[in-house]
Image (spheres, rainbow, N blue to C red):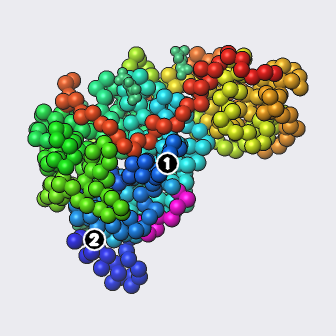
Amino acid sequence: MAFTRLSVSLLALAGSVLADLQPIEMKGSKLFYKNGTQFFMKGVAYQQDTSAAGAAGAVKFVDPLADEDRCKRDVPLLQELGTNTIRTYAINPNSDHSGCMKLLQAAGIYVISDLGEPSLSINRDDPHWNTDLFSRYQKVVDELGQYSNVIGFFAGNEVSNNKTNTGASAYVKAAVRDTKAYIKSKKNSRWMGVGYAANDDADIRQEIADYFNCGTVDDSIDFWGYNIYSWCGQSSMDKSGYSNQVKFFQNYSVPVFFAEYGCNLPDGAAARVFQETEALYSDEMTNVFSGGIVYMYFEEANDYGLVQVKDEQATKLKDFDALKTQVTNAVPKGVSRDSYSPSAQQQKCPAVSTTWKANSALPPSPDSSLCDCMVKSRSCVQKAGLDSKKYGDMFGFICGAAPEICTGINGNSTRGIYGAYSMCSDSAKLDYVLDAYYNKLNKAASACDFNGQANVQKGASDSSCDSKLAKASDINKQVATATAPVGGAKSTSTGDSFAAPGAPMARAFSVGDYTIGLYMLVAVLAGAGMVAL
Ligand SMILES: *[C@@H]1O[C@H](CO)[C@@H](O)[C@H](O)[C@H]1NC(C)=O
Ligand SMILES: *[C@@H]1O[C@H](CO)[C@@H](O)[C@H](O)[C@H]1NC(C)=O
Ligand SMILES: *[C@@H]1O[C@H](CO)[C@@H](O)[C@H](O)[C@H]1NC(C)=O
Ligand SMILES: *[C@@H]1O[C@H](CO)[C@@H](O)[C@H](O)[C@H]1NC(C)=O
């Protein structure tokens, strides 16, 4: 096995502990080992269903890389499958991952991970990109970035999944931009990519692929992961739509791979033959696609598993051997990095239209120092320790009674207009509107009470905050009357007959579907006048 050779030779050189896997790098639309050989993902999704966390009601998850005993059980099986990459959907950045990461290193397995977790991710129905989310994303980067076998991250998974929620992509792209900048800013940073994992929806296929690969490179994805379930059982390049995907992405300027595949039709997961795996690593596809990730290791209620885990014991299902045969037989032919000169350009940003509602002017970068300055300087704020469940009523009341106040905390991704504090946490936003409302009522004591849930404080003045606060206040003045993009990042805009429909996908674990939108509540409550003054 290649890795054994590598580690032995490095051991001989360094006389030290087990050698780390060589980092993966990107050039143009391809991935390479550091040594210049092209890298093709032979991946498996590795994350248990949320119910395995024993959560009743609360959205919890099992961090798949935090329990070394489970990794000891599973990594040899992943290795037997010929896996060189796993995809994880949610990790806990406060846990220790060194045990599992070491086992994966030793097995020659890389990791690509989503940055969110079920209760902290960009929600398609109530999208935000704020200090809480960015802080979580940074922690995941800090934690996993320690390991050389981490390829990169997904800033979102199927967030905009059809034409009804395309505006959410602006927030995901802002997350891509800021996470990339964060990785770059870290000392001794190496390349790790930040990409997006998309479903395939015919209505928005062109726009969404263009959107994430348009404008400046710094603002755009490093890779496009496609969740594709269109090859079911026995099929063909044409019938499955794979040949159209190859054509569609032939001029895409960053790597493209299947972030999930493995249709379980017609007869369930165990009957899968993985004929598509052979196609994926064939010459017809390897020019354009960098391999893919099979959904998924664990057999769950949605029936996509390769392995059944019961009482901590893992049992291979019938499709395990089918996949193993296909993956271990596949020898994708790559190019060498030195002989490859990429020519593809960034796409043109899609215009806002009836199907595409995300402006190319992106939301602002979360800036916790600005939010902190703002909160400190307010005169009316929430009472210390207020339960966040109470926020909805308070936002609802103020935004209903004085909608102009809330333009400073809201964003409109279609128009590209963002309040200066739209990137703050909900808690900071609440203080902003409480104070603005109090001021609107000329600081009447009764205007800062809200049934004892708010109180007056002596707003601290801090000279290091002054210019920031003045700038934010200026932005919010413009936002209140804006007709063109303002408050976010500058606009970077410069502008078929496909697969058989993908198999319906019942995902056991899906990030981004859970968070209950605070502002959906606001919409319901606005004007209801529920809070007595
Ligand atoms: C680069 O590393 C990979 C993975 O260890 C190995 O398969 C490949 O043969 C190496 N290429 C060269 C040119 O040494
Ligand atoms: C769009 O996606 C949402 C969320 O998955 C779903 O509830 C809705 O029915 C979909 N709408 C259309 C038109 O497909
Ligand atoms: C891709 O680029 C090549 C070379 O520039 C061009 O001939 C081809 O038409 C392009 N394909 C698509 C789908 O845009
Ligand atoms: C954004 O503004 C447009 C145009 O004024 C409006 O139709 C749309 O409802 C707004 N979207 C949000 C999320 O407020």
Residue at 22% x, 71% y is: 1
* First along the sequence among labels 2 and 1: 2
Point out the quarter of the image occupied by ligand 3.
top left
Q: Quadrant of residue 380?
A: top right
Residue ID at (70%, 44%)? 369
Q: Quadrant of residue 18?
A: bottom left
Q: Residue at x 29, y 62 (%)?
A: 314
Q: Nearer the viewer, residue 131 or 209?
A: 131
Check mark 2 vs ligand 1: CB closer than 8 Å? yes or no: yes
Q: Is residue 457 above or below residue 269?
A: above
In the displayed structure image, the side of residue 328 where residue 295 appears, left or right:
right
In-front residue for pair 447/340: 447
Which residue is painted at 17% across and 47% down in the image? 272
Mark 1 residue element: loop
Residue 308 shown left or right of residue 57 in the figure? left
Q: Secondary structure at mark 2?
A: helix
Q: Spatial distance from mark 2 to mark 1, Cα to Cα?
A: 39 Å
Quadrant (top left/top right/bottom left/bottom right) for the C terminus: top right
Query: In x, y percent, where is residue 497?
Result: 19, 24
Say which residue label 2 marks: 3
The residue range painted magenta reads 93-100
Q: Position of residue 433 (x, y in %)?
A: 73, 28
Mark 1 CB lies closer than 8 A to ligand 2: no
Q: Are marks 2 and 1 in contact (CB under 8 Å)?
A: no
Q: In front here: 309 or 131?
A: 309
Q: Nearer the viewer, mark 2 or mark 1?
A: 1
26 relative position to 274: left or right: right
Dot 1, crowdedness within 10 Å: few (<14), some or many (≥20)? few
